[in-house]
Amino acid sequence: MKVLLSCAGLDHARRGFESFARACFEALRDDPALELELVKGSGPRGPSERSVPTLSRDSRTARLVARASGREPFIVEHAAHGLALVPLVRARRPDVVYLSEWHVGRVLAGWRRASGQRFAIVLNNGSSSTPPYDHFDLVQHLTPGAYEWAVDRGADPERSAVLPYGFDIRAELDRPWGDDRRALRERLGLPADRRIVISVAALNRQKRIDYLVEEVAALPEPRPFLLLLGQVEEETPPLRALAEERLGADGHDVRTVAQSDVRQFLDASDVFVLCSLWEALPLALVEAMGRGLPAIAHRHPVMLYALGDRGRAGDLERPGELRELLAAIGDDELAPERAAERHRSTYEQFSWDVLRPQYVELFRRAAALPHRHRVHRHPEQ
């Protein structure tokens, strides 16, 4: 099968969609059942990987168009990327176009309807978009709960699938310990003698970074060191100021790093925390548990699905809840044996080794479905 994997923000945005697109491409590119090509909105070309330059969400033009149309800049980026894909789709004649961006799908569906070209459009519904999905041929929901929620609201079960994100989790845990871990911390400029709590999330209030800072600040001395990794946004400066005020320069750090560098920061840390109240499927949470870290998240069906028996959940809307959960994690939970247990359980549920054949089957199923030609506006757009 010829499959185009599209991601408009890859190589200039650092969010879950972009991280997954890169991981998916690397995991499936050598599968003998697929002829896979990655198409992105910026960055260098490579084997089976090409850029289709379009309007970046951060460009002046995209912001002007967004302001004039009353839309968000990322929607302008996605629509422009969809238009830029049309010549490639016409030339490559794929069996399947696989994407995570709603508006890219809308543009391609419009082109398909006008041209009569036949290809399946598969949406990875990582943004938990609501039905109807009439311009997609198949919608991938990341958890059983998300699938049931969508079907209850009118989604066609025949054009819906449950399949979580795949993760690059190795069969054996290779996390550093002892002197190797101390050397890693020194190289990364992290404290050698303190417990490190890490959160990997966009640096905004939706991810509830302010709550996380306040909860860590309320712990008694010697409190953990808080490490925040994430994309800088408009809300980031006041959150930086809050962390500086409540934790001090020696009690925290805020960094934006490449996705490929996240693993070493996880290996240098002790506990992972995600404070957002909901996610389609929390990538960073699963990645952390795949590196053996104990994890804490909000008690929500999706978070519980991701956590399994590997972490702790609580009502993270309640002041004081997170600090109690952090205080309850003893040194025994940080031991190598417990880390290996968390890793193995996560590997068996989310690794590409386990999920790769299911992704190939997802594309086969989509290619076999009668293609849709209706194009509807999403009720929330």
Image (spheres, helix red, strand yellow):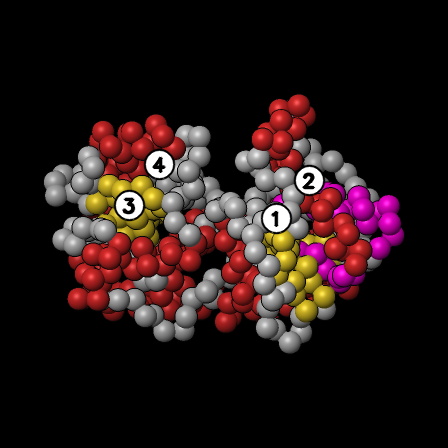
Query: Which of disc 2 and disc 1 is earlier in sequence?
Result: 1
Q: Which mark is drawn over residue 296?
A: none
- x, y (%) of residue 238? 34, 27
**Can you say whether 165 is above or below 202 in the image?**
below
Q: Earlier in the sequence, mark 1 or mark 3?
A: 1
Q: Say which label, 4 or 2, has the lower sequence index.
A: 2
Between disc 4 and disc 2, the foreground one is 2
Residue bearing the label numbered 1: 41
For marks 1 and 2, give the CA distance: 11 Å
From this view, report whether residue 361 is shown above or below residue 114: below
Give how far apart the Cα atoms at labels 4 and 3 are. Answer: 11 Å
Quadrant hosting residue 132? top right
Q: Which residue is under mark 3? A: 227
How far apart marks 4 and 1 lie (CA) works out to 29 Å
Location of mark 2 (residue): 79
- Amino acid tagged 2: Ala
Residue 17 counted in the magenta span: no
- Between tags 1 and 3, which lies in front? 1
Relative placement, left or right, of 71 versus 13 is right
Q: Quadrant of the C terminus?
A: top right
At x 37%, y 41%, the residue is: 275
In the displayed orientation, state which residue is furthest to the front: 44
Question: Which span is picked out in magenta?
Answer: 92-117
Name the amino acid, label 1.
Answer: Gly
Residue at point 35%, 36% (across, down): 209
Q: Is residue 246 left or right of residue 272?
A: left
| Label 1 close to label 3 by CB (< 8 Å) | no
Q: Quadrant of the N terminus?
A: bottom right
Residue 179: x %, y % from top left: 17, 66
Label 4 element class: helix
